[in-house]
Image: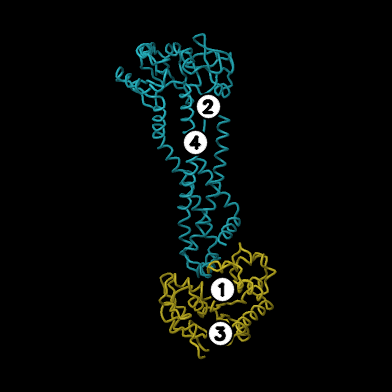
Chain colours: A yellow, B cyan
Amino acid sequence: MSADPIIEVNGLTKVFHMGGVDVPALRGVSLQVYPGEFLAILGPSGSGKSTLFHVIGGLTPPTEGEVKVAGSDLTAMTDGDRTKLRKEVVGFVFQRFNLLPTLTAEENIAIAQHIAGRDRQDQAFQETIRMLGIEHRLHHKPYALSGGEQQRVAIARAIVNSPRILLADEPTGNLDTANSETVLSILKELNQRLGQTILMITHNPAAAAGCASRTVHMRDGKIVDS
Amino acid sequence: MINKMVARNLLHRPIRTVLSILAIAVEVTMILLIVGLGEGLLEDSQRRTRGVGADILIRPSTSSAAMNLSTADIPEKLVAKLAEEFPEIEVATGTTVMMQGDLQTITGVDWDRFLQMADGIRYFGGGPMEKPYDAIVDEVYSRHKKVRVGDTIRLLNHDFHVAGIVESGKMSRVFIPLSTMQDLMGWGGKISQVYLKLRDPKQTYPVIDRIKQLLPSYPVYALEDLLTQAAADVREMSAQFVNIIIGIAVIIGFIVVLLSMYTAILERTREIGILKSLGASKSYITRLILREALVVCSLGILVGFGFSVLGKWVVEAQFPLVSITIPANWLLGGATIAVAGSLLGAFYPAAKAARQDPISALAYD
């Protein structure tokens, strides 16, 4: 890889203080992700992969170490800076879809544009819904959508502002096989056709092998191989 | 978009939203009706005082502009003396006043002199008082108490025969002969106040100056000045009570909005986490919550205005002697108080929502 990494993590530790006890979740993680890469992070529950996801996504600050995302050093960031990072640089896809239940599919996508200060239903919006194949489900609320449709709306929401990095946390964890394959193929297409950098967390090796260009394994808060 | 989200959130829990709106409406209604009641009583009293047609009023030395109830300290012969000494006076008459239990007064009058001063009066039935125990009531009193000409009414622990029913807005709702009230109250030769009507109202202040020289111990008022001063005195006296009611109303609004918004943000913890993951700032979340509170408050204010109009109608229909006048500036005042209480109530939940840790919020079930 000749380009500079878009995500650069060196010696990252993250310690949670729970009930007066320090619980280390990440113990010196180092990782580079390059623009256009589709990286899958595999590992069992408690391995620290979700914590890594949260730190890289600016949802929580690191305890120690260096984390650079799109050239910005997360260790020096304020809460407001991390909010800006989430608004402008990264898009999230969650296992539980995390759509706003009172809004329609269309509004769930548009809210991301609104928060980013963009015009609603611009060209990016139209292209995104066409690509995700959800034009006919836009006026439905989440409860009226299947799991696969909800996750496609969530992906549309995550990419509608053209983030430089898409972070997906177990995106197929709540889906049946057919819908899992659909979602993975959408992510793969996003990566291959649009060059979208994707960092996907999964515990499913087959899912990682099917679409990721690179895979790393985590255990006990460390990367054990790559 | 944010407005749509606010609307959807409010419609998502319709009962909570309706209850919150009703609570704000009750707050606004309480404020407007209490203020309106005070203003209505004052306005009604002023209208009736103006209806006398006098230019100058003389009261006992112990009275104030606002209060002159149930006393008679002025010698009755003063009326004749003033009429003799001041050629500018067209009519001079003395009255006695006694408070009834329902905030209304019974007035003892020299009926002929009173009619001269008031430029006549319209009878809805019957005629003038001719006997000592005749009484005249106005049409509002007649309607409310279901009193007709020829009926007997109990006043000052005595039976009076209703001789006539007259238009309202002329001094009092219940009149009895001056001499009868003086006898019954033991106020022989004394009156409560003196009304003077001048041939030329422009002479009011010069005449007042001369009367003050003659009667230095009596408060002498130009009628319009008295009404203005009385209004100010009454408002000052009632301010404490009104402020207490406003305080209670604000506390109700504050608590309701606080509870409503607090439960709303607890219920929407996960949604707040989602918004944060999308890059929503603290100010965005705060604005969302405050806007929701403002919408509830605005609807509550509008419903409160409606309730106030309805309340005024019901009170005036049930109690015709009571008049409610809601001053236009208090519509704004009531609304401002409600908004202030609501914003205060929404502030803590909004701050709590804005401070939420996104990871904890996203993990909330």
Q: Which SS class for mark 4? A: helix
Q: Position of residue A105 (x, y in %)?
A: 63, 67
Question: Which residue bears the numbered disc 3?
Answer: A36
Q: Residue at x 42, y 74 (%)?
A: A77
In this picture, residue B260 sits left or right of residue A143: left
Give the amino acid at mark 1. Asn
In the image, are marks 4 and 2 on the same chain? yes
Mark found first going from the N terminus, 4 or 2: 4
Q: Tell me, for residue B345, which label it has, or none.
A: none
Q: Relative to B128, is B355 above or below? A: below
Question: Which residue bears the numbered disc 4?
Answer: B36
In the image, are marks 3 and 1 on the same chain? yes
Mark found first going from the N terminus, 3 or 1: 3
Q: Which SS class for mark 3? A: loop
Question: Which residue bears the numbered disc 1?
Answer: A161
Q: Give the class, few, some or many, for how many residues have Cα within 10 Å of label 4's Cα (few <14, many ≥20).
A: many
Q: Nearer the viewer, mark 3 or mark 1?
A: 1
Q: Give the class, few, some or many, for how many residues have Cα within 10 Å of label 2's Cα (few <14, many ≥20).
A: many
* Real-space Cα separation, disc 1 to disc 2, in angstroms: 67 Å
Is the Cβ of the residue at disc 3 closer than 8 Å to that at disc 1?
no
* Real-space Cα separation, disc 4 to disc 2, in angstroms: 14 Å
Is the Cβ of the residue at disc 4 closer than 8 Å to that at disc 2?
no
Tell me which chain the residue with mark 4 is part of.
Answer: B
* Real-space Cα separation, disc 3 to disc 4, in angstroms: 71 Å
Q: Give the class, few, some or many, for how many residues have Cα within 10 Å of label 1's Cα (few <14, many ≥20).
A: many
Question: Which residue bears the numbered disc 2?
Answer: B321
Q: Nearer the viewer, residue A108 or A59?
A: A108
Q: Position of residue B175 (x, y in %)?
A: 49, 17
Q: Residue at x 39, y 31 (%)?
A: B233
Give the amino acid at mark 3. Gly
Q: Relative to B224, is A93 above or below? A: below
Q: Which SS class for mark 1? A: loop
